Amino acid sequence: MIKFDVLTIGNAIVDIIARCDDQFLSDNGITKGAMNLIDAERAELLYSRMGPAVEASGGSAGNTAAGIAGFGGKAAYFGKVAEDQLGAIFTHDIRAQGVHYQTKAKGTFPPTARSMIFVTEDGERSMNTYLGACVELGPEDVEDEIVAQSKVTYFEGYLWDPPKAKDAIRECARIAHKNGREVAMTLSDSFCVDRYREEFLDLMRSGTVDIVFANEQEALALYEIEDFEQALKAIANDCKIAAVTRSEHGAVILKGSERYKIDAIALQQLVDTTGAGDLFASGFLYGYTNGHSLEDSGKLGCLAAGIVIQQIGPRPMISLADAAKKAALI
């Protein structure tokens, strides 16, 4: 029985988003455009120096689950929070988006993860993440029936940082494939790729992962080359389906010898790139699991990404379903 289009698995993080200038990044030793892992002490320091901020449930896979629900799809989520204020915010937010979420919270220490996201005037986001409770996600949190009832199980590459999560992911992949389902992953970040290159390639080449999402920089980093065309050929050879995003140049969808180039949507204003890749994945996976072609699924991905980067924060403030209907994509 199929109950969900997509189950997403990720680091359950509350996003705290504020604007800043490049000087602020420099003064505080923040690597622009990257996801920097930080400890609790630095998290408190950066929080104290932030300007006015928006707080909402986030995390890469959580954003994707919310996007799928926003299109009208059926989404579930696995992710760990603590029994604290931020944990309550995360749980309320993701359920309010229409996502099935029942992962049991774990005590009060370590506290719920949070990511301080600094957005500069060019729309680039620099993330500073304290992982906290989310690293406690493990095989005991896998709900077998949810995996078995989901067409695609999707996880974020960031999950390769906490060790227990690897075992949970492998168990999910086993259950998914046993039930004739598929597994997808996002490479998440070029720094993440550098940390786990060989393991990511093994996941793809072994068939543990069927569908891979990457941006151009991550694809180049995966193969340690500078030729984008070579990277596309390599990733198409290493997995069943690959979706590679290219910012203003749209995306490329690959399946064997098939290739579809998808144009980015026209923007009125670039505000904040937070969640662009997450929302691309939501559009593509919604389309893919609801019978749309690879090309149209790619168009849904570009639509969702284009919408989210014209606002602050990773959760679209307009209806993705309405936008897709207006664009004649659903």
Image (cartoon, rainbow, N blue to C red):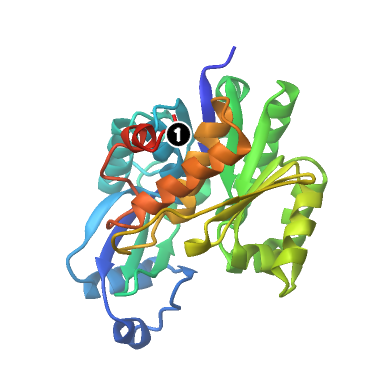
Identify the image quadrant of residue 95.
top left
Q: Give the left or right position of residue 42, taking residue 2 as reference.
A: left
Q: What kind of residue is marked 1?
A: Leu
Question: Looking at the image, which is closer to me, 50 or 283?
Answer: 283
Q: Give the left or right position of residue 278, taking residue 214 as reference.
A: left
Vertical arrangement, residue 275 with respect to residue 298, above or below: below
For the N terminus, give its image quadrant. top right
The reply to whether residue 282 is in sight is no
Count the marks: 1
In the current view of this chain or complex, which residue is farthest to the left? 52
Vertical arrangement, residue 6 with respect to residue 24, above or below: above
Residue shown at the point (32%, 69%) measured from the top left: 119
Give the image location of residue 271, x and y in percent: 30, 64
Give the image location of residue 102, x and y in percent: 42, 28
Question: Looking at the image, which is closer to me, 306 or 285?
Answer: 306
Give the image location of residue 202, x and y in percent: 79, 52
Residue shown at the point (61%, 64%) measured from the top left: 216
The reply to whether residue 239 is in sight is yes
Question: Looking at the image, which is closer to me, 136 or 231?
Answer: 231
Q: Give the left or right position of residue 248, taking residue 317 as reference.
A: right
Query: Which residue corresponds to mark 1?
Result: 329
For the C terminus, give its image quadrant. top left
SS at mark 1?
loop
Give the image location of residue 276, x and y in percent: 44, 55
Vertical arrangement, residue 96 with respect to residue 32, above or below: above
Residue shown at the point (63%, 39%) measured from the top left: 168
Q: Residues within 10 Å of mark 1 (few under 14, many from 20)?
A: some
